[in-house]
Every structure is written in C-alpha cells, then in structure tokens.
Amino acid sequence: MASTTDAPNDRAIITVLGSDRSGIVAAVSGALANHDVNILDISQTILQGIFTMTMLVDMSAADADFACIQDELSALSDSLGVQITLQREEVFKFMYRL
C-alpha cells in the first residue's frame, strides 16, 4: 500500500453513492488506473441495497489533469447510475471540518 504522506494537493477524495450493482468498484478503480491515479485507501459498504464508497487517491503521477479525470468520472457516473464526486483533499477537509 502506498504512503499517505504525499503532498496534500496531490491527493483527492472520491465518493460513490447509489443502488448496488456488480462492477462499480471495478469500473471506478479501472478508470483511475487508466490515468495512473493510485488508490491510497478505500472503504465501501452496502446498506440495504445502497452502495457507498470513499477513496483517498494520489494524483501525483496522473497522466491527465484534475478536470479531465473529474469529467471522465462524471461520464462513468452516468453510465453506472451512481453519483461519483471527486474533490481535492484540502477542499474536502475544509468542507467537513469540525
């Protein structure tokens, strides 16, 4: 597993939410792998048929910029019928600070 001490501005949070179906994890992780985005941590669960997943990813080696990957995940979101959100780690932490 990769180190989670990478520069925060190279890290992002991905959340996925929707009705459970096979292939969601594979599709999202495949899209990330296609752009050399490394998954640092992942948590997923299914609550009464609702699939939820949160990923911490390292984008420092990505072969595309943040907006391009965000657009690709948005298109994937539509094809899978789930909601996929990609946020820079610092934005996520700011939004959900206590």
Image (spheres, grey):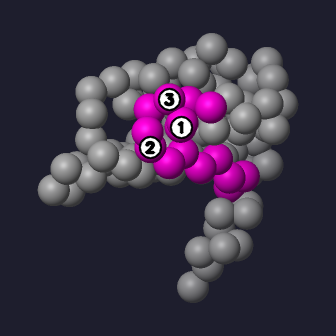
The residue drawn where x is 81% and y is 23% is: 64
Res. 5 in view: no
Disc 2/disc 1 C-alpha distance (Å): 5 Å
Secondary-structure class at tag 2: strand
Q: Return the mark for residue 77.
A: 1
Q: Where is residue 10 in the image (x, y as percent from the top left)?
A: 76, 41
Q: Return the mark for residue 82.
A: 2
Which badge, 2 or 1, is on the more N-terminal residue?
1
Disc 3/disc 1 C-alpha distance (Å): 6 Å
Q: Which of 15 and 8 is in front in this view?
A: 15
Examine the image and state in which quarter residue 27 appears. top left
Q: Identify residue type, mark 1.
A: Ser
In this picture, which residue range is highlighted in magenta? 75-89
Q: Where is residue 74 in the image (x, y as percent from the top left)?
A: 63, 38
The residue drawn where x is 73% and y is 35% is: 71
Residue 91 vs residue 41: left or right?
Answer: right
Q: Can you identify the residue that label 3 sits on?
A: 79
Res. 71 in view: yes
Instruction: Reply yes or no: does residue 82 show up in magenta.
Output: yes
Secondary-structure class at tag 1: helix
Numbered-mark total: 3
Q: Label 1: few (<14), some or many (≥20) within 10 Å?
A: many
The residue drawn where x is 16% and y is 56% is: 48
Q: Where is residue 14 in the image (x, y as percent from the top left)?
A: 56, 46
Disc 3/disc 2 C-alpha distance (Å): 8 Å
Residue that lies at the very extreme toward the bottom in this rendered image = 98
Residue 49 vs residue 16: left or right?
Answer: left
Instruction: Reply yes or no: does residue 40 show up in magenta.
Output: no
Label 1 near label 2: C-beta < 8 Å? yes
